[in-house]
Amino acid sequence: MDETVVKWLYAPNCQQEAINLISKIAVNLPGMIFQILQRQDGSVFIPYVSSGCEYLYELEPEALQADFQVLYKLIHPQDIKAFRESITVCRTTVTPWHWEGRIITPSGKLKWIQGTSQPELQAEGDFLWNGLVMDITDRKQAEEKLQESEARYKAILDAIPDLMFRISRDGEYLDLKSEAENITLSREEIVGKNLQELLPSDVAAISQVAIAKTLDSGTLQTCEYQLPTPLGVRDYEARLVVSGQDEILAIVRDITERKQAEVTLENLAKKFSKAFSCSPDSITISTLQEGRFLEVNDSFVKLSGYERDEAIGKTAFELNLWVHDRDRLNLLQELQATGIVRNLEFEFRQKSGKIITALLSAEIIDLNGNKSILAVHHDITERKQVEAQLRLSAQRDRLLAETLVRIRSSLNLEQILQTTVTEVRQFLQADRVFIGLNNANLGIRTLAESVDPKYPSVTGWSTNDEAYLQELRNLLKDNLVRVIEDITKISVSPKVKAHCRKFQTKATLAVPIMLGDELFGALIANQCSGSRHWQPIEIDLLQQMSEQVAIAIQQSQICQKLAELNTNLEHQVQERTAQLQQKMQEVEKLHRVKDVVLHTVAHDLRTSVMGNLMVLKNLLNQGVGSGEWGVGRGTRGQGRIIEEVSPLSPSNAPCPMPHAQAPIQVSQSIIERMTQGNDRQLTMINSLLEINSCEKQGIEIKPEPVQISTLLGGIFAELEPMLTQNQATLKNLVPADLPLVMADGICLQKVLAHLITHSLQNNPPGLNLILSASVEAGMIRTQIQDDGVGMSKLECDRLFDLHVRDPQDSCSTSIGLKMYLCRKVIKAHGGKIGVISNRKRGLTFWFTLPLATSSATNHP
C-alpha cells in the first residue's frame, strides 16, 4: 500500500474511501493485505485486514482485528523466534520487513507464508505497517522438487562443454567450471584474479562493460571477442546473466568454427547475390504452369537474342524458343515427379533462328507464395561441335592406325588399296572415293574405287588425249591439295567440265600420292549429290591416307625387288651354311683338344702339387716335434738345414746320394708360405676341374625340403674355425619360423664358405658379419652383410662372371673361380645370386632359394 492510500486513510472524511479502494485491490490478490498501527505505548491497532485472511489463516478479518496475538498462536513453534526477531530488527532499523515461515491453521494444515511490509515512522512517533502476506506453500514444494532435481541439473551442467565463470561487478573471477582441454590456465591461476590481469586490455574493457550492463539491466547480455591461443587466434562468445548480488555468470563458448562458417556464408551470400546477374549461364525464373518469364539475367539476353523487356511477361512458346514443343511437357513431368532436374539436354531456337544445344537444370521454388521454376541453361553448342570433331578425329585415327597395321602386316597391295577407299568413303560419307594412277606409258587409270551404286563408276575409264591428261596432271602439280566445293564455280577446260558431267561430280577433294619427288597418282573423293564444304579434318585425313598409300606402294615395290633377290640369296645362304658347318666341326675338334689338354694338364699339376704338399707338411710335422728339418739340426724359429730328399723314396726318408750336396737352410715361415701357395694352386686346379665338369655335364644337386634356419645354423657351425682364425664375428638374425626351402646342404655349404672366404681374404682381421633371411615373392632371400671394404658397381656386376682377371684385381683367380661356381650352384637351385656395395662401407652378398611348396613338385 503506497503513501497516497495511507494519507487517504488518515485524512478527514477520506478514511472510508481508502478502505474501499484497498478492499477492491485485495479481492484480486492471492494473499492478505494488512495495515497495522503500533503506537508508542505498545498497543496495536489494525485499521484494515483483507478478506484473504480467511483463505490464509482460516480466520475472519474481524477476529484478527480484535486480537492481533492470535497470529502468534498459529506460527510454527520452530519459526516463532525468527518471526519475533524480524519484527524487532525492522522496528529498530526502520528497514523493510521480510519473513518466511510456517503456520498451522485451525484445521491442522501446514502452510508456508511470506510476509513483507514497509514500516513508516509517523509524526506522533507511531509505526505504520503496510504489508502483504502470501501463501508460498506451492513455491516451497517446488523448491523441494528443485532440490531433488539439482543433482540431475548439475550433471547436465557438467556435460555442457562451455566454460562458465562467476565474475563480480568489478571483474574479479569468483569461480569457474571448465574442462581441462578447453582452458590453458589452472583454477588457482584464475580464481581471485581480475579481468585486467588475464585478458588483453581491449577484451577486458568489453567484458567489463557487458558485466555492468547485465547487472544494471538484469537481462541477458552477449559479447564476442578474440583471444590468442596455442592453436592460433580463436573467436569466443560470452553470454552473461545475473547470478547473484553484484555478480554474473558468464558462459563462454568457442565459436571459431561458427565465425569461420559465418564468414564463409557471408562470402557465399555476396557471391550468390551476384550469381543471377553475373552468371555466365542463362538463368530464368518463370511460372510453373504457363512458363511465363518473371525474370531473366543478362546471359539469357546474350544467349537467346531477346532483350529483357521482350522476354519478361512472355512464354517460351510465344518467343518460339522450344525447337521441340514436347520438351516443355517432359520438363514439367520430371519437375512434378522429383521437384528437380539436372543437366537435361535440349535444343533451343535463338531469335535469329539459329539452333543451339543447352543443358537445362531446373528446380521448383516458392516465390511470394507462387510456385515458379528457376532454370539454368548452359550452352554446350560449341562443346557438341568439339565432341563431333573429336569423334571424327577418333575415327580418323582409327582408320589411319588400321591402314598402317594392314600395310605392315600384308603384302597384298590390291587388297590394301581397296579397303582404304572403302573406309575413307564411309568416313567422309562421300559418294565416290578412288585412287588414280599416273603412268607415262599407261596414261591415267583407276587402281581402286568405292562408289555409291546410284552414281557411275570411274573404273575402266581411259583416254588417249595427251593434252587432257596433262591438264589433269597439272591440277595436282607441286604436291598441292585440290579442294573444289562447287565444280560450277571454278574455271576449267570444257573437257574437264564434260568429264565431271559424265560422272556427275559436283564437288571434289584430291590429294596427290608422291613417291619421293615423283607424282605417282592421287587419292580423290567426289560428291555427286551436290556441292560440299570439305572440313579441315577431312582434308587432313586424305593427306595422311595418301602418305600411307605411298608407303604401301613403296613396300610393294620393295617386295618385288626382294623377290628377285631371293633366289640369289638362297644360293648364297646354302654356300655360307656349308662353310659354317665345316667351321663348327673344326671348333668342336678344338674344344675336344682343349678338354683333353685341360684335363691332362690339370691332373698332372694336381699330382705334382699334392706331392709337394705331402713333403712340405711332413717336414713341418717333423720340425714341430724334434726341431729338425730333414737331417739338419738347429734351433726352432731359426734357419733349418734340409738335405736333398727324393720324392720317390717312401715316408720321405732321406736317400743318400753318391755325391751329397751341402744342406740348405730354410726357415719355417718359408715352408709355411710354400704350403699355402701349393694349397691355393690345388684349390684353383680343383676349381678348374669342377668348372670343366659343370660346363660339360652341369651342376649335380640333390635338393630336399629343409628348414633354412637349421641349415644355415649347421653350416656356420662348421665354418666357426675359419671365423675364429680371422678374428671375425657372425650375428645370426635368421628367423626360426621361415618356411621350408628346396636346397642341397652340401652345395649350399660350399657357397657360403666361398662368400665368407671372399670377405675374409679382402679385409683385415676383425670383420663383422650379419646373416639374415626373409620371404620375398615366393622365395627365401638370404643376405650376408659385412662392414669391410666396398667395391665399385662394375666390380659388383662382374664378380660372379668367369673371366681372366687383372693381376691387380683384389679378387684372385682362385676366388674368382669359386664365385663363378657359386652362381652355378644357386642357378641350379632355381635361384639368383648377387652382391651390393653398401653406401657407408662393406658388401652385402645375397642369394634366393625357392620355397619347398612352390618348387618341390616342379624339380626333376
Image: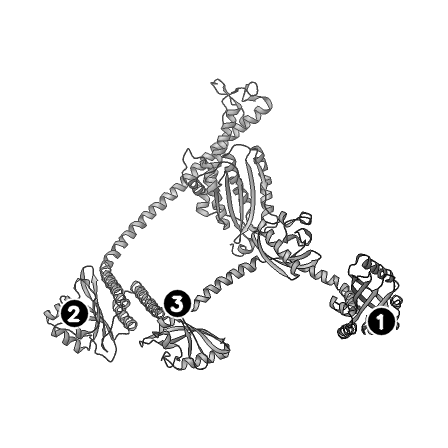
Query: Which one is nearer the viewer's eye here, 352 or 16?
Result: 16
Name the residue carrying label 3. Answer: 280
Distance from disc 2 to disc 3, alpha carbons, whole Å, reads 58 Å
Query: Which one is nearer the viewer's eye here, 140 or 272?
Result: 140
What amino acid type should be assigned to the residue bearing mark 2? Ile
Q: Earlier in the sequence, mark 1 or mark 2?
A: 1
How far across and how far down the image is residue 706, in percent? Answer: 58, 50
Q: Earlier in the sequence, mark 2 or mark 3?
A: 3
Name the residue carrying label 2. Answer: 444
Where on the picture, by quarter, is residue 386?
bottom left
- Label 1 environment density (alpha carbons within 10 Å; few <14, some 14–19, many ≥20): many
Q: Is residue 527 left or right of residue 103?
A: left
Residue at 53 percent across and 49 percent down: it is 849
Asked if disc 1 and disc 3 are in contact, CB closer than 8 Å, the reply is no
What amino acid type should be assigned to the residue bearing mark 1? Tyr
Instruction: Give the vertical position of 3 relative to 454 (above or below).
Output: above
